[in-house]
Image (cartoon, coloured by chain):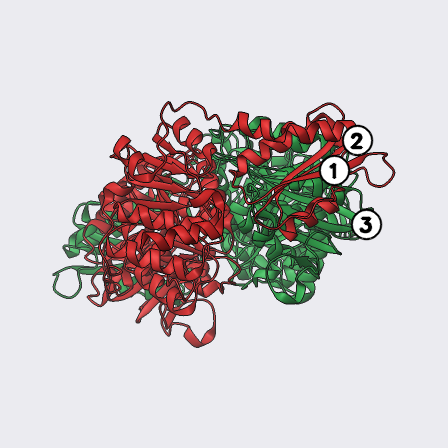
Chain colours: A green, B red
Amino acid sequence: MEQGDRQGGGPLSPAVTRSAVRAGSYHDSVVLMQLQRALAALPGVLDAGVVMATPANRDVLAVGGLEADAGAGPDDLLIVVKAESEAAAGEALSRVDALLQVRQGGEGQDFRPRSLATALKQLPEARWVLVSVPGRYAADVADEALDHGRNVFLYSDNVSLEREAALKRKARDRGLLVLGPDCGTAVLGGIGFGFANRVRRGPIGLVGASGTGLQAVMSQIHHLGSGISQAIGTGGRDLSEKVGGITAAQSLELLRRDPETRVIVLLGKPPAPEVGDGLLALAASAEKPVVVYFLGQQIEKFERRIGNVWFAETLQEAAELAVWLVKDAGLKREAPISGYLRGLFSGGTLAFEALRGLHAFIAPIWANFGVPQWRLADPLRSQGHTVLDLGADEFTVGRLHPMIDQDLRLRRLRQEAADLTVGVILLDVVLGDGAHADPAGELAPVIAQTRAQVVVIVIGTDDDPQGLAVQIETLERAGARVFRTVTEALLWIELQMEEPPETEEHPGGQAVPPESVQAPVAVINIGLETFSASLAAQGARVVQVDWRPPAGGNEKLASLLARMKK
Amino acid sequence: MEQGDRQGGGPLSPAVTRSAVRAGSYHDSVVLMQLQRALAALPGVLDAGVVMATPANRDVLAVGGLEADAGAGPDDLLIVVKAESEAAAGEALSRVDALLQVRQGGEGQDFRPRSLATALKQLPEARWVLVSVPGRYAADVADEALDHGRNVFLYSDNVSLEREAALKRKARDRGLLVLGPDCGTAVLGGIGFGFANRVRRGPIGLVGASGTGLQAVMSQIHHLGSGISQAIGTGGRDLSEKVGGITAAQSLELLRRDPETRVIVLLGKPPAPEVGDGLLALAASAEKPVVVYFLGQQIEKFERRIGNVWFAETLQEAAELAVWLVKDAGLKREAPISGYLRGLFSGGTLAFEALRGLHAFIAPIWANFGVPQWRLADPLRSQGHTVLDLGADEFTVGRLHPMIDQDLRLRRLRQEAADLTVGVILLDVVLGDGAHADPAGELAPVIAQTRAQVVVIVIGTDDDPQGLAVQIETLERAGARVFRTVTEALLWIELQMEEPPETEEHPGGQAVPPESVQAPVAVINIGLETFSASLAAQGARVVQVDWRPPAGGNEKLASLLARMKK
């Protein structure tokens, strides 16, 4: 807009402001935006506003210096023009109807069905109906779509909680999804609905009662090099007590069964307590990692993870966690461990960090360092869970450090391996200059003969003289699970030591069939035409319905007509 | 070792165990390890142990089935052999002296100086002396090196706290470093001392009172694609009250002045309170980010960052934070902000997350959502710090969502820009299908005319139809600071709003000259020969000193000699 810097000029400008009203008429919001732009671009016009004349919208105009001189109600269209002269303002207002007319010609689609039923005849494979008509009509349109056995993406807001709950219960009974109302975002079968970023397809499935939250997380996942399988928006109120998280539960269940989805992310404002409990139980039995981000919920460090469910504190962290969980395929329950843990460390700091981390899930742990209370009576003999720093002074007088000479550790490893109460043995292997030339080669034959699960933390780089890849491969071939950090090794051990959760039944109603969210995607769009354009641009098949409100938007007439139909 | 699986056979085996003693003789630990291996490899020998005969070492042998039948004291060398027959055991023991002899021939270096003074004549450019002789001799050797104006890497353990403190005070007065005692790791001028991983050179400088801690962090930094400038081990007791963190403070100071170091990592066990305070004050005035990991110290979420000092809770997290801080060059104090913040969001979730994050450092914040207590009286007029969700119902009745139609936001942006009490304006720009075709293009002219600092969170991917790079560039050219996540944007704003810390004076004594840790590296090695080999393999110039303990290790004679020298 060229007039941009002259807008909102205030009392000093000699401008005149004039307004017009079109009573009780319905227009698509895109049409209103385009009319406003067209008016503002006319000669002599400084600024223009075109809104439905609600009190809030009138206030917005007034603050911007577009005070309306005409009376109008919330169902009326209000047009305000600020111009350099009376003549210019009058000229602009006189062109309103012509400009509205031009816009309503429509584009692209030759024949536009005027009802959902007709549209479905034209595109019977459409599994989805995208509804963005004004809120007071939206629930009826959605309901009609459900009656036709179609899933609904309900972009419209201003639908009552009661209608939302009713629509979702009906959908659940029929194995259908209602995303929304006020659903901003979904990516289904690779096609973005509403507002959606173009992201790599990949192993992360998203469920979100938050539109821009989904967009922020999907964008960050893409940025981090991973991708998404599905992103399912539920509408912001889905997790409320009244709605009961119906759509979120259906979506979790869908992603849990989806073989392409390896990690699930669940986003939303903190849910109603019962709804939250139900969703977390469902997540806990998903048999894949689930990252949960409930906006504004502070997480205590020790509550960061419960089984396969991980809690994030920011959108960025939710994305990072999901990507990390995908990469770390090792972090799942795969080899149940019972029995004592024995840690035989060559690195003191690694031993210390391991002892501290292990305390989160096993106790007591005996050691040859740390608090006197849990000090081993005899460092040469383990008891219960034990962690040893083999580089401690008592082991190294007149003896090389265990990072150079593994003799002591090999002897101790055999000793621990012979102990039938031992379930897991944790070792570090520190590579680099100065260290043993082939620690894995020496350890491997002993590891191979160890009944207990051996877990090794390998500290090293791909440039280290021992050859990082060879060292890891040697250890793995001997049967060890290898990790690169203490943190990851302990997470894995914790997962193996835990009781598996009970499997949760699916959330009632009929299961949503997987095809509902699979390519190819075909959609009936009812409402904002821009959504048709963007769906088509992404390769989806779309039919736009040339929707008009009942009785042309006249509420009284509409309710009369509805009563006559009964 | 082929006999590996027959070792530790216990009482069932018909083996005989015999031992021998070499009284009061000193041998390099590598020599002892090699002797043990040579003995174990002889025909008929099942296992062998070669140790200084401390009670602990004798216990270790006994637990492994190598009970010594000879009496010996802690200064004596004890050799134990378990063999299939009396003859084999006798034969093995008879070869001990010959095997020790063979080993002592030395390798490589033609002429071996027998003193540090002579070695320094051979390699006068050596700035470092690596000391790994037994602890009771180590402090004297280190002291001699300081007298020669050389820095010391003191690998040896069993040096008293008092000697350590005295050595470090002396070093500090002369602008020298004493790394250790019991220092496992350093990488100086690209050369690894002691145990060190081969890591990319890069912008992260490490200081650590923890050897394997340094190795774990440097390996992980390398793994994450970044690299290190210097890694300076201080010895595990440097942060104790007695030593006072002298070496850590000198090292922090060195890295603070080092132009190659852009992020510093400080590792160690929790320091003595006064020592910790001093180091944190030094870190706070480093004018670059410092990541601190004090092992075992639990960090509250709200204490995660204080100014430029970041606290990590695991080794892995310390490495990740450092790499992230390097990448995010934007996260530094560069554009002091005063005045109110105004957030104009198109995404509700982004607005919510921003409001929550901002509460950590500014209050009160008024909003058109969230708790009623801080609800704006009039959403059309900001007051104090204000965050607005422009997609809220009151702004969108009969109007397109602000992600499609920015008209309302542009008007509000001009309104905020005209308010002289405003210091920073925070916007989101959400790209993707369905959204405005060029939001940055519309915002840029208005941003360019805004006196306040504009910060924009851009949510999008490089595949989005608007073109992520173009959108970011357009915003940046208009003068906005652009971030990709709410978290990063808020961190940057927080840094700009804070008071800068006072600059700390350097920690007394003489400053360590930068050349001390720069390439090319030349070292005098006194002690374990393997360190000479690994230094040379990395391209450092090394001279090995053919060190012998005073009076051949005979303590009484040695103290007599020392007294005669006075």
Residue at the spot of label 1: B18
Secondary structure under the numbered disc 2 in the rendered image: helix
Query: Neighbour class for label 2 at 10 Å: few (<14), some, many (≥20)?
Result: some
Earlier in the chain: of badge 2 and badge 1, it is 1
Q: Residue at x 34, y 66 (%)?
A: B386
In the image, are marks 2 and 1 on the same chain? yes
* Amino acid type, mark 3: Thr
> What's the distance in space between the residues labelled 2 and 1, CA to CA?
8 Å
Please name which of the two marks, 3 or 1, marks the residue nearer to the observer.
Answer: 1
Label 2 resides on the chain identified as: B
Q: Marks 1 and 2: in contact by CB < 8 Å?
A: yes
Q: Nearer the viewer, residue A181 or A201?
A: A201
Tell how many labels.
3
* Amino acid type, mark 2: Glu
* Residue A171 at x, y percent in the picture: 71, 49
> What's the distance in space between the residues labelled 2 and 3, CA to CA?
37 Å
Left or right: residue B351 compared with residue A156: left
> What's the distance in space between the residues labelled 3 and 1, CA to CA?
33 Å
Residue A421 - label: 3
